[in-house]
Amino acid sequence: MTAMAEPTGGRVETPVASYEATDLKLRKTMGLTQLTALSLGAIIGSGWLFAVLSADSTAGPASLFSWLIGGVCVLFIAFTYMEISGMLPRSGALSRYPQLTHGGYTGMLLGWAYLLSAATVPTIEAEASVTYLNAKFPTLGLISPNSTILSWPKGIMLGYGFMLVFFLLNFLGIRFLSEVNRWVVLWKLVIPTLTFIFVFAAFRGSNYGSAVGGIAPMGASPIFEAVATTGIVFSFLGFRQALEYAGEARRPQRDVPRATILSVLIAVVLYTLLQIAFTGAIRWGNIGIKVGNWSGLSTSSWASGPFYRELHAAGLGFLAAFAALLIWDAVISPAGTGFVYMGTGTRTFYGLSVQRLFPPGLQVMSRFGIPWASLLAAVFVGGLFFVRQPSWYGLVGFITSTTVLTYIMGGAGVMSLRRLAPNWRRPVRLPYPWLLSALSFVAATEVVYWSTFNTLVEVMTFVFISIVLYLMYYAPAKGFLAPSQGLTLGLVFMAAWVWIAAKGGWVLRTGTLPVHGSWTFGTYFTAFALALVLVTAATWLLSNEAGRKHVQASWWFIFFSISLFLLSYYGSLGVNLENSKIAPTVRFPWDYLVAAAIGLISFFWAVHSSFETEELHELHESLSEGRSAGPEPEMEEAWKPLRGEVEGEAATAT
């Protein structure tokens, strides 16, 4: 490994080659308060401003259960990352863990999925701010008439203006970013709390009664659908920020796990209370739709600013006055999340570069200690999605699904590292590891499934195009494939993949119905699955022995994706065609059980497929010396209530 040249004039001359040495460049300035604030700052963004209405339009009053289910799923996922992040605190963490245990092929697929989700959050937060501003100032024309789509040029250009602000805040360095975020988080906690209190003043119990169809007028299945498609899980995704900035924490082994769980628990309580209050304060006459027409909320005038419209509709003067303040919160809260997530996108590019999946130039630091090339890349990718999906409601499902798709590696990663590195020091050691890891994997699987076919068809298409990057850049650079082989196979797959997507008629379309003359689903799915299997098999055949290990360790993910994608079409959540659904072949709850079975099979297969990669071997050499296998006593004590242990009993090592 070549060493890193010392910075000159605050700038790095040569990127670090060593996987482990790269994080030494980052400034370690963040404590527990700052890490918790960072996660809360990302969690409390646009989600609570829009998801309450979107959830009601999908599940009715039962949406409050959707928030609780979403919170529980995220907690299971967060538990597993507590152990991993405690033992391996790294910036860009979630994009880097898959490659450690499953190699470059899996690392590219999941790292690319995570990159898509992280880089698009600043976009959706900017869209949220613009949308709420239009609710207050409709004459500005920031939104297209009778829609929630940003107008061109006014709305989209203002969105780009927010992105520029996010860029500048990140460019000035992590210390400046964390200090700004500290004060923004205080604001973001106070305003949603006051909103709950004031909206609750207009609460009507009849909105939970028989007049509107009861507590669950749409049935049970939409409760779960709302978790993934309406912004609920999206609203919790900021928990990962403490993990992403772990390489810049002073005491990461202790503070990162605590900050992660604390931020999720605070958010669960706050969001559930906001949903209860919003549902109870709906004024059907003001909206102009029939009482109990929950699905009509999504296309109503309230969709452009749910809480703002509701506070005005209450008919109480002091609530209308607070609504004006809420407009500015609708700018500050999403903007606060946006600049934090732009840092996340930056560190994801950085992390993928450290893994050698992207060029090393993305690791070059500015004088402020920020990987500036990665920051520019994050701005560019996020900006593209203003063109692809200039609407909060349109982009939220894509971000949720791509993010949670990568979270399946939390559970698989814990058990893979227990298998490959059993003696490493674990400051936080997960109790009942097989059980909680499997539950984490299944929880992530269900959320991905709940995203529905209409979302998954785009997610799967965009995620697997990253195979081209593996073939044309990573595999030749590592010596797994000859450059000519990688280039040829990559170009062939890219041409086939674009052709399949176009003939399928589902991707990059503005309507819900596939284009006239497109393939039937059976033909499309067969071509989709064959393309993935054949390119993976061809890559395995052409690779050398080392490269084959990387491809072999990815077959579980190919199985997972193809199986879940097929189920999403035929299951109870089905596919939307002109606002109606194809009659499901696998009905609720059996489709949920099938999804869980797919998750369990994939989980055990993933753990079995893990192997000691080059990066993991390097970490073995740098971390194993002088480290014990046991957890720190203070963190071990924190797990006792979960295991049912009482004071004085010996903690049983798992």
Image (tube, grey):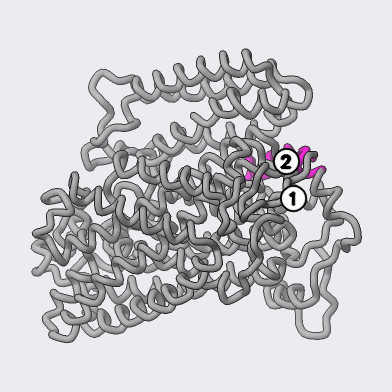
Judged left or right of residue 369, residue 550 is: right
Crowding around mark 1 (Cα neighbors within 10 Å: few <14, some 14 to 19, many 20+) is few
Judged left or right of residue 559, residue 150 is: left
Q: Is residue 448 visible?
A: no
Magenta-colored span: 600-617
Q: Which mark is residue 21?
A: 1
Give, as a three-letter code, the residue at label 1. Answer: Ala
Whether residues under marks 2 and 1 lie with C-beta atoms below 8 angstroms apart, the answer is yes
Which quarter of the image is occupied by the N terminus? top right
Please tell me in which quadrant of the rendered image residue 381 appears.
top left
Residue 482 percent across, percent down from the top left: 68, 16
Judged left or right of residue 194, residue 211 is: left
Residue annotated with mark 2: 17
Crowding around mark 2 (Cα neighbors within 10 Å: few <14, some 14 to 19, many 20+) is some
Q: Is residue 359 magenta?
A: no
Residue 215, above or below 513: below
Which quarter of the image is occupied by the C terminus? bottom right
Residue visible at 83% across and 70% down? 652
Give, as a three-letter code, the residue at label 2. Answer: Ala
Residue 545 percent across, percent down from the top left: 78, 23
Please tell me in which quadrant of the rendered image residue 555 appears.
top right
